[in-house]
Image (cartoon, rainbow, N blue to C red):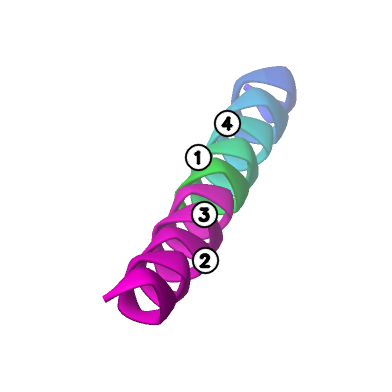
Amino acid sequence: MKEMEKKEKMEKKEKKEKKEEKEKKEKKKEKKEEKEE
C-alpha cells in the first residue's frame, strides 16, 4: 500500500513538473513570436 502511494506521488510530481516545463516553453515561444512581429 505504501509503495503504491509513493509511486502515485512521484507520478503526480512528474506530471506537474512536465506541465510546468511545457508552460515555460510556451511562454518563451510567445515572447519570441512577439519580438518577431
Mark 4 burial class by Cα count in 10 Å: few <14, some 14-19, many 20+: few
Q: Which residue is mark 2?
A: 28
Q: Is residue 32 magenta?
A: yes
Q: Where does label 1 land, which residue?
A: 15
Amino acid, disc 2 = Lys
Q: CA distance from mark 3 to mark 1?
A: 15 Å
Q: Position of residue 34 (x, y in %)?
A: 33, 79
Residue located at (51% from left, 54% from top) = 25
Q: CA distance from mark 4 to mark 3?
A: 21 Å
- Residue 37 pos. (x, y %): 26, 76
Q: Which circle's residue, 4 or 3, is located before the other in the chain? A: 4
Kind of residue at badge 1: Lys
**Residue lying farthest to the front in this orientation:** 37
- Circle 3 residues within 10 Å: few <14, some 14–19, many ≥20: few
Q: Is residue 21 left or right of residue 10?
A: left
Residue found at the far left of this picture: 37
